[in-house]
Image (spheres, rainbow, N blue to C red):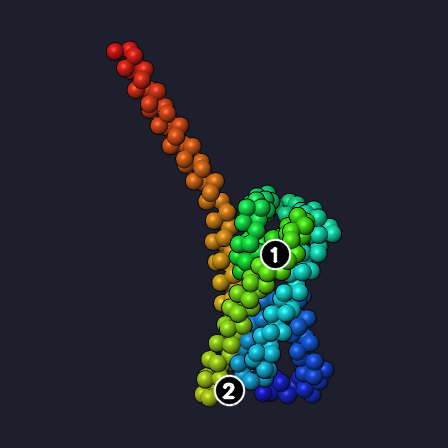
Amino acid sequence: MENFLQFLETNLPWLIQYKYLFLFLGAILEGLNTLVFGGFLASVHKLNVWGTFLLLLLGHSISGYMWYAVGYFAGGKSIDRWVRKDEKGKKIITKVEEYFHRYSARALVFTKLTFSLTIATLITAGSLKYSLKKFSLFSFIGSVCWVSLTFFIGYFFGQSYKFFLEYIKGFLLFVLFLGSAIALVYIIKLVLGSAFVRSLFITDKIKELSYKLRNGLEEFLSTGNDDDNQS
């Protein structure tokens, strides 16, 4: 890693000089990889831990306001462009919107741990002119949860990298541990997103099952009454 940083200092000195600025912009515009990378660099003492964490949290929070503004000024139609030809996507987005209407606070917090549902929820909040005060609170809580998780994973893999660096040196080890941290975060986000989507549809399945049970019970009772009348 030292060789990598020396290469950057020699060929791209501005990247090292303005590292905090680039992390801040990355947290706003990109998100996941930047958060993990920030935690990793803080772990190997290339960045201040708490300063980096708070900077990434600020950037991630600002990103939420940007998508809220998209929904506020452009309306819910801006979501349709993503799922215009995807019937499954349309159903999921519709369920997310329904969930937001019923549980807006939970939606803003939980969807921060998913992929595309995060942006869809933030845009929905803006399109519905959701209270900016409430949005700020719950979106911030979601950001704290997500940034803490990703930053910790990056930090943990950075500590692991430092341990193995005593035995194995080389840029490949740096890439391996950083890539593993990012891959783990992607897996976690996919699992959480999939679980959230399934939870959106489970209510419909429960209703469908209850309807079938009720209809079956009514049919059974009506058959029993007909037999009594005939006897």
Please, which residue is most extreme toward the front here? 133
The C terminus - image quarter: top left
Q: Report the residue that reaches farthest toward the left.
A: 231
Q: Is residue 207 visible?
A: yes
70 displayed left or right of 97: right
**Residue 44: quarter of image:** bottom right
Residue 92: where, in percent of width, then height? Answer: 56, 47
In this rendering, the answer to whether 182 lies above or below 106 is below
What residue did someone put label 2 on?
A: 169
Identify the residue at horizontal 58%, vertical 71% (top origin).
35
How far apart, in angstroms, are the residues tagged by discs 1 and 2? 49 Å
**Mark 1 or mark 2, whichever is nearer to me:** 1
Residue 145's place in the image compared with 40, above or below, is above
Q: Is residue 176 above or below residue 143?
A: below
The residue pinned by badge 1 equals 134
**What amino acid is at disc 1?**
Lys
Depth check: 110 or 37 in front? Answer: 110
